[in-house]
Amino acid sequence: MKKILGFVTILFIVWLLLPISQVNAKPENRHDQLTLPAHDEDAEVVYLGKSKDSDTDQVVEGYAFIYRSRDSKPAKSARIPNCYGYLASGAKWKTVENWLVNTDNTRGLDSSFVLDNLSNNMTKWEDASDGIIGNSLGVNILGSGSETADTLVADTTAPDGTNEVYFGDIAESGVIAVNTIWGIFSGPTKFREIVEWDLVFDQVDFDWSATGESTKMDFENIATHELGHSTGMNDLYNSSCNLETMFGYASDGETIKRDLHTGDINGINLLY
């Protein structure tokens, strides 16, 4: 009888502890694998088609910007004069919209670090929008971020009115991150604008670091580049521009893109 009572007591204690362990357990990353429409193997930009902006009912177009590791493809060597480019001439944010981030990841990055670092990296671009680094007189471009535990989805068929950032599984190998951006990119320049962005960092093929570890992708390095897209800046593939944050390839341990270079600063200043 004592043995039975002891066994029942143990079961009762285990039952009491279950809710505690469930509350404290780290949530699983529930985001679906990101698969882009069919495209050439080395494509750097993928067209997502046309849809309507859920906020304004305007017809918009979507593009996915693919960020590959440096070994995926050699940089083009032709020289360009300015070392900056745009998603489309004049296409920029005209209304400030906030963003959400699900910081959950399987690579050990601290949640508060991810949120704070994203915010700081956005500030770099905003600070540079007046052409001067460090005077804090730039334009508020990307708004403020907040953390969510919700499952987020990068919009590849239509914008949903929310700017989202998360770690996930990008189906195509060798791709560090994908930024899907919706907006008006054609027609009269004065009517062009960006209306939404969603950013996915791959955590299946790539490991991530907060400190520039040589065998991992540096989060700040990659995030600063990707947020350049979110403001309206385009990739650069000329080797003469390899010091720019918007240079189109990255590698493990690289940190040079953490800080905006001359072309980045001039480009964002002229755009805003």
Image: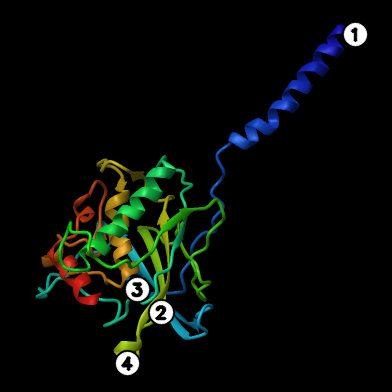
Q: CA distance from mark 3 to mark 1?
A: 72 Å
User: Which of the two labelled residues, at mark 1 and mark 4, occupies the earlier sequence position?
Assistant: 1
Check if mark 3's residue and mark 2's residue have beta carbons within 8 Å. no
| Front-lying residue, 143 or 271 | 143
| Front-lying residue, 193 or 165 | 193
Q: CA distance from mark 1 to mark 2?
A: 73 Å
Residue topped by disc 1: 1
Q: Quadrant of the C terminus?
A: bottom left
Check if mark 3's residue and mark 4's residue have beta carbons within 8 Å. no
Q: Which residue is painted at 31% across and 44% down in the image?
A: 216
Q: Quadrant of the N terminus?
A: top right
Q: Which residue is painted at 29% across and 51% down in the image?
A: 220
Check if mark 1's residue and mark 2's residue have beta carbons within 8 Å. no
User: Which of the two labelled residues, at mark 3 and mark 2, occupies the earlier sequence position?
Assistant: 3
Label 4 element class: loop
Q: Is residue 43 visible?
A: no
Q: Which residue is painted at 25% across and 43% down in the image?
A: 212
User: Which of the two labelled residues, at mark 4 and mark 2, occupies the earlier sequence position?
Assistant: 2
User: Which of the two labelled residues, at mark 3 and mark 1, occupies the earlier sequence position?
Assistant: 1
Q: CA distance from mark 1 to mark 4?
A: 86 Å
Check if mark 3's residue and mark 1's residue have beta carbons within 8 Å. no
Residue topped by disc 4: 188
**How would you rate the neighbour count of disc 2 (Cα within 10 Å): few for under 14, some for 14-19, many for 20 or more?**
many
User: Which of the two labelled residues, at mark 3 and mark 4, occupies the earlier sequence position?
Assistant: 3
Residue topped by disc 2: 183
Residue topped by disc 3: 45
The amino acid type, in three-letter code, at marker 2 is: Gly
**How would you rate the neighbour count of disc 3 (Cα within 10 Å): few for under 14, some for 14-19, many for 20 or more?**
some
The amino acid type, in three-letter code, at marker 3 is: Val
Q: CA distance from mark 3 to mark 2?
A: 15 Å
Label 3 element class: strand
Q: CA distance from mark 4 to mark 2?
A: 13 Å
